[in-house]
Amino acid sequence: MQVLERLRDSMKDIVQKSIKRTYTNAKRLRRLNERKLTPKVNEFMRYMRKQLQRGLIRVKARKPETFTEQLADWDAIIEEGKRILKPELLKILAEGGKAVVERKVIKQEAEPRFDVLGVPAVKWAEKHTAKLVTEVIEEMKKAIRQEVKAGIDYGKSIQKIAKELRPIVGLTSRQAGAVAKYRALLEEQALPEQKIASLVERYANRLHRYRTQLIARTETRRALNEGVFQGFEQIGIGKVEGVSSPDSCEWCMENINGRVVSTDMARSIDAEAHPGCECTWVAAS
Ligand SMILES: [Zn+2]
């Protein structure tokens, strides 16, 4: 009895250690790739902001209804975003695939190579980058429309609105709203205009950095996990098990941790995970 118990305990120990190792490896891989993606996200966001800043200079004749659409050549921004981000996301996907296929996640007898130029990888990178860039832009348009409407309701001129939009173009509607609230608060205190502008800019810049980081983190995880799923599929493993860190949120503990599902199911669960999620998937034993 005692021997059995001890055996069970040591088995538990081994399982826990191996889960911990898997989790640590996945985390390291994520950090490494996040560091590579962040400058690219930054490049895209900067490019976009520059285009919008340019559009905000001569706005006198603009009507509020067409203000946002005419602000920039949005299609060109989408194309540039894809050009900047797609190669990097494909590379990260490949890292996820390699981690599985080339024995970092599971032991394999042969020496297979992850096929990064196969149809699924290229297709995913194409589709996902377009979706990501469009989402970022749509959210930003929403923020601009929201601030234009608020400004007009308040009785501000279109030039004044354009001026106030300068620091916030590139933020989400929620972040833009927070900056606008902050500005209103400073205006109530009757501070000099120059002082208000510099405080607002500092606050907005913090939010820009935060947004870039969050996009990089979320997209790194998405691309890595997609690579992991494709890696398993390439070596014929159809079932995966979710692994969460002990301090994961309740949602992840319930929906990801310990769940054994098909790779397709794992994909759809993963798509619902919160932005900063750190969970990973291993081959189901
Ligand atoms: Zn999670």
Image (cartoon, grey):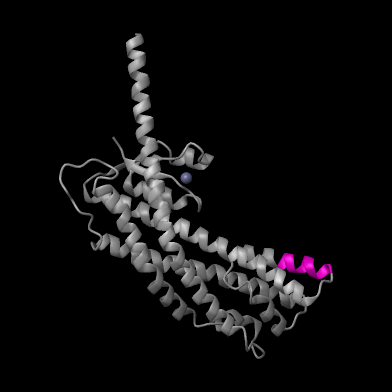
Q: In the image, 252: left or right of 105?
A: right
Q: Position of residue 108 (x, y in %)?
A: 20, 42
Which quadrant would the N terminus be assigned to in this image? top left
Q: In the image, 273: left or right of 88?
A: right
Q: In the image, 203: left or right of 266?
A: right
Q: Position of residue 248 (x, y in %)?
A: 50, 41
Question: 125 and 245: which one is in front?
Answer: 245
Furthest residue toward bottom:
61
Q: Position of residue 189 (x, y in %)?
A: 84, 67
Is residue 259 in view? no
Q: Main secondary structure of the magenta part?
A: helix
Span of residues in magenta: 180-189
Q: Is residue 172 magenta?
A: no
Furthest residue toward top:
1
Which quadrant would the C terminus be assigned to in this image? top left
Residue 223 position (above or below residue 247): below
Question: In the figure, residue 11 lies in which quadrant?
Answer: top left
Identify the residue at image location x=51%, y=60%: 213
Identify the residue at image location x=37%, y=32%: 17
Furthest residue toward left:
110
Identify the residue at image location x=43%, y=45%: 279
Identify the residue at image location x=64%, y=87%: 59
Is residue 183 in view? yes
